[in-house]
Image: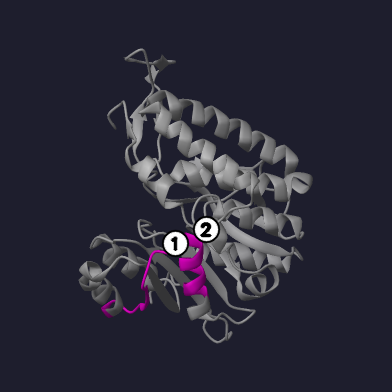
Amino acid sequence: MTGDTASRQGTGRRVVAVVSSFRPSTDLVHNARLVAQQVDELVVVDDGSGPEHTDVLDAVRAAGAQVVALPENVGIAAALNAGLRAADPAPEDLVVTFDQDSAVPQGFIAALVAQWDDAVRAGVPVGMVSPATFAGVPQTIGEPDERGLLRSREPIQSGSLVSGEVLATAGLLREELFIDLVDIEYFLRLQRAGRACLAVPGLDLPHELGRTYPFTLLGTKVRWRGRNLKLSLSTPFRYYFRARNRVIINREYWRSSWRLLARDTAMEVRHLVFVLMYARPRGAALRVVVRGLRDGLRSRTGAIPADVAQTASRISWRIDPL
């Protein structure tokens, strides 16, 4: 551990990181070392990547991580939960989660821990601390208050810190959601429980946001204020989960967070319009989304149904990534 470690020697408290991986490249070894330098313990959970990735996981283990290799793909929520159970945090311990692609800057975790401790000293019932921006994208509301505390808004799970007490009280991640909106559900759960979700002003977690595409109409790139507009498109099967889990989360949290969810839903609908514009074939994309909405209304959860996955595998995008 370096001088930038987040551990607190002599306090008895551990700072633990849990990293999820799926079909990792050797970049995971480098990223795991960056995290291991900043914490007392590192757990890497592989979500059923298979034997062809054993060499990478062995190298991660040699870098000082405890590796939990799951026999099959169970989704991000269940994978992270497996890591959290392996870490077995005491109430006073702090745990931060990351994706395999997160290249964590030196001092990042220490900044999260410092903000947690400052808020606790101020008498705030802390639920989560996250970076103010994720890949440069803001995930905050308003400005810091007179105590220097800044509220977060639906932070991405990668780079977010909780305590063992929070996990014991609020519970683990919702495994039945499988992948998309898992972190948003946890944020809403903490808010409803009266726990403060905070961000560290000025702290950013560099990260790839997936493939970016040019925004086009009738084959022409659209410009606004001198710049070409861009949008991010997910892997087609993800739109089943996004539609399904949006319905489930809206139904569960509408009373406590209706303003936020109304805004999110409007943005999701707008994005789905773009998805249908650029999907090929459009009918297949529409069927994937409609099935997600229908399964959400019927409270069906878990992995994507095989027939929907097959339909999604036929979808491609009409535009090339940047």
Residue 188 shows in the view: yes
Q: Which residues are magenta?
A: 62-84
Residue 176, image x and y in percent? 56, 60
Q: What residue did someone put label 2 on?
A: 302
Q: Quadrant of residue 257?
A: top right
Q: Is residue 25 above or below residue 271?
A: below
Q: Quadrant of the C terminus?
A: top left
Q: Is residue 79 magenta?
A: yes
For label 2, the crowd category at 10 Å Cα-Cα, with few meaning under 14, some 14 to 19 and many 20 or more, is: some
Q: Is residue 203 above or below residue 21?
A: above
Q: Secondary structure at mark 1?
A: strand
Q: Nearer the viewer, residue 286 or 228?
A: 286
- Identified by mark 2, the residue type is Gly
Q: What residue did someone put label 1 on?
A: 98
Q: Is residue 195 left or right of residue 70?
A: right
Residue 321, image x and y in percent? 29, 32
Q: Is residue 124 left or right of residue 114?
A: right
Q: Quadrant of the N terminus?
A: bottom left
Q: Residue at x 42, y 71 (%)?
A: 38
Q: Is residue 90 left or right of residue 159?
A: right
Q: Secondary structure at mark 2?
A: loop
